[in-house]
Image (tube, rainbow, N blue to C red):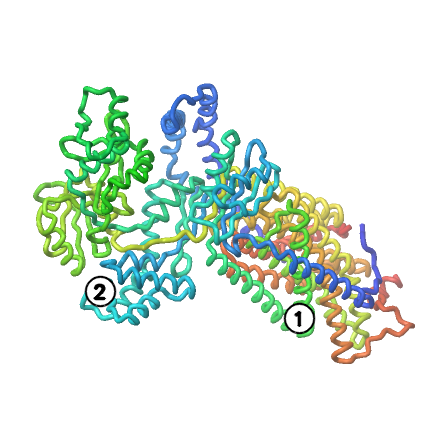
Amino acid sequence: MRKNRFKIILIVAAILLSLYYLYPTYESGTYDKKLSELSGQPKLEEYLQAHPLQQLSDSLRQSEIDSLSQAYSADSTKYYDANAKAITSAKLKRIKLGLDLQGGMHIVLQVNVLKMLQDMAKNKDQTFNKVMAAVKQEVQQTHADPITVLARQFNQRGIRLSRYYGDIRDDNSKVISYLQNQANTAVDRAMEIVRNRVDQYGVSEPTIQKQGGSRFIVELPGVSNEAEVRELLQSTAVLQFKLLQPEDVVIKVFKSIDAVLAGKSDSVANADTSASDTTMTPAEFARKHPFFAIVRVDSRSGDAYVAETDRDKLDRVLAREDVRHVIPTNFEFLYGAKPIVSPQGEKFFEMYVVDKDPLLTGSVVTNAQATIDPTTNSPVVDMQMNSQGARDWSRITGANLHKRIAIALDNAVYSAPVVQSKIPNGSSQISGMANMDEANLLAIVLRAGALPAPVDIVEERNVGPSLGADSIRDGLLSGILGLSIIMLFMGFYYRTGGVTADLALLLNILFILGVLAAFHATLTMPGIAGMILTFAVAVDANVLIYERIREEMTTGKTLRAAIDQGYAKAFTAIFDANIISLFTGAILYQFGTGPVQGFALTLMIGIVASLFSAIVITRVVFDIMMERGATSINFG
Amino acid sequence: MRFFPRTSIDFVGKRHIWYTVSASLILIGLITIAIRGLDYGIDFVGGTELTLESTPALQIAQIRSALNKIGHGDAQITTFGAASQYLIRVKASEQSTNTSTQIMDVLKSSYPTTQFTLLEDNKVGPEIGAELRRDAVMAIFYGLLAILVYVTFRFQFIYAVGAVLALFHDVLITLGAVAIFGWLVPWLNLQIDQTMVAAFLTLVAYSMNDTVVIFDRIRENLKLYKGENLIRVMNRSINDTLSRTIITSGTAFAVLLVLLIFGGEVTRGFAFAMLVGVTTGTYSSIYVASAIVVDYNVYIKKVDLRVPATQSPVLEIERPYEVAAKRA
């Protein structure tokens, strides 16, 4: 015992540490189980089986299901609230399951520098578009750095870059370094924008991680609505200031559209179209004025609204060939970013008709904060612009006094303030927010959208939840089966030695899981495969040792001498072989991505853990057996 | 209990026959690759790939005719696992940002009474594909380099050469097997993707592991029997480790077989490549790695290694302790 005291302490410590790190995983599992028991999901499904909601429209059915599930999940919500802290802390410390095991989306986004250059240009005239097209073509062919190509293309034509970028007085090198800087920081901005959006989207445990210079990975566990996520991530966060079209012109265009839809020639579109018309039944009104049945115009303010459920319909109408004919080419239809909820609970979006060409892009905005205006005691947003922007802004506000300018991020309008006065110094104040939250949101939008950072989805992996569950089941099944085969064989072939090796193998699994938990590593399907492979390699060490011990025992050596010699002689082979495996694992980890890294990590952890258990633990067991007076140990 | 009592098989003497066998196997594989090409997954060439399930099951032709409507009639469509699960792959050059949504939509509208579930959906841009390919090649290159350096350091340079050539041998044979079986047995889902690269690196590690165990015994026996004929020592060493070789390979094989059958779609290709790899890895330790060390001595260093007729080609039990055991 005394001889092995240090080793025994080490083994016990390793076991205790593993258990300590694994406890949160167990705890989290218990909480999840409890929560799903309380959630009433089965009861809800039962109810839905009995009461099919087929007569309702899709959106209504969904909202009905949502409210029902809320009612059924009241218990689980209460339980969650009571234990929120413990649940979150356990969740943070548990072994995470990879997306391939729990389902979800893995997306790699890359900043599109070409598009960024296009978006950042101050004025996109014919010359610019021509140069840009040439740049695009060259970059696509040669994969050269877009900014270098852009600079050269402009140089060849003898055009100063400052005509389109930066301050007009800047020389080319200054503009280039400015653009380079923007390109380099674009990924950080894009990440910030995406993080912001993902948070708003409400995904639990999203991961947003930078990869190299211009890419980042977004992982959304449990999310499978691809179209929505794509829109969420890829819509380039571009902040623009767009002038609202004059109300009277807008109404005229609306009437023309209405006439086209109703099948009348647009010259006679002069019927009374106010929504307050009560002489017609809704059906009759919809027939006579199909457009105004979708778009409701407030007769006093002139604001137009569309119901959430009608948005798709409206988009289709506006895309119609004959309708497009009556819409002036510089018209653009934008929706408000957040819906307005009517007292009846119906959601409406305000529709803004704006000038297609932005007055200004958000790139001139340098900062924005939400504050309380001390004089009116209401929330406001202060916005600052750079000198170039301030000059433009001064001209723009001067020319558009008392007109409305929409602030749109990704073409979703967050606010459309009225220009009260000419703003000479680039420092504007936007008021009219209902509360501080709204003001904060606008400030965030102004900041995040201030500089364009368009991104492309370069890789997208989407695992459905059912496949994830299948993978877990398959992984567990093959793991347990593989393990049983090995353990039975070892016990059968090497008898006492084999059983000892089996014990070491089980502890090995505990150690691997413990280390995974301690590193907050993610367990993936290839990771499980790596672990199963580790089992096979782990017994190899014991096979080598036991074969040697058997050889030594045939010579009539004492048990102790045979065991000593067996371990000593087998050691060099085990050591060399495992060092090489460890190298391979490290190289895989270095060059691999995602699933391969998961595999490499478990393989490396597995090698170290199995060396420890196969060499140290089995040896201690045999030593103890001998100290207890065993004169022979059966190695088969 | 012993499966393999002390054997005395002349492994090294028959190495030339096995060179032919190895060369033929590699050639068959390479010819298949040349004709059929390797089935690269979207990881390496980019593209959109989706796995979906339909109830009731559809014919592949039915799916193809639906895809034709949106211009993806030439997509690769195979059943995947169960008969009602399909894998649809669209080339990178033909994919758009929402190819998978388009495909799901056109399927749903073409067969309104059939229910479609999207199981998995992957989209990789062509640039990423090129990068992953480069990384994979780098990983394998650095892996081999590390092995070459380590084995040279621990043994001798020629042993390292033998070991690395054995690895090339294993990788080529496995690659050929992947090409042939991927073509003949679509169920295996064999495509060259990131998981497959992991499988190749693992089989490299496994094969190396096996080779090192034999080399270690050769190193030990050469020290014990200085001046003894290398072929005889080598044969002795291979026979000494045979029991271990077969038991370890056997357990690894059994575990991988379980993984192949029960591990599910994701790891099937991995398990298959590893099964082939474990087999050739075990074989190549003897007939490639060790054999090359022998032939280097015979043909380059011109050492006369012919075993006289009076001697057994396998060095026989001469260890002092074994003699003692006999006496006792």
Residue closer to the observer: B139 or A347: A347
Viewer-proximal residue among B162 and B117:
B117
Q: Residue furthest right?
A: B310
Q: Residue B301 in the image: x percent, y percent? A: 75, 80
Q: Quadrant of the N terminus of chain A?
A: bottom right
Determine which residue is flagged by label 1. B160
Residue lying furthest bottom in this view? B302
The disc numbered 2 marks a residue on which chain? Answer: A
In the rendered image of this protein, does residue A38 appear above or below residue B76?
above
What is the three-letter code of the residue carrying label 2?
Arg
Observer-side mark, 2 or 1, equals 2
**Residue A348 seen anywhere in this rendered image of the structure:** no
Of helix, strand and loop, which one carries label 1?
helix
Q: Residue at x 26, y 34 (%)?
A: A260
Mark 1 closeness class: few <14, some 14–19, many ≥20 residues within 10 Å: many
Numbered tag placed on residue B110 in the rendering: none
* Mark 2, residue position: A163
Q: Is residue A355 visible?
A: yes
Q: Are dots 2 and 1 in contact, CB under 8 Å?
A: no
Q: How far apart are labels 2 and 1 at the CA level?
A: 63 Å
Does residue A375 appear left or right of residue A127 in this picture?
left
Q: Secondary structure at mark 2?
A: helix
Chain to which mark 1 belongs: B
Horizontal and vertical percent position of residue A64: 37, 25
Q: Amino acid at mark 1?
A: Ala
Give me the residue at 44% from left, 28% from top: A38
Position of residue B189 in the picture relative to residue B293 (left or right): left
Is A280 rendered above or below residue A430? Answer: above
Residue A424 quadrant: bottom left
A47 vs A156, nearest the viewer: A156
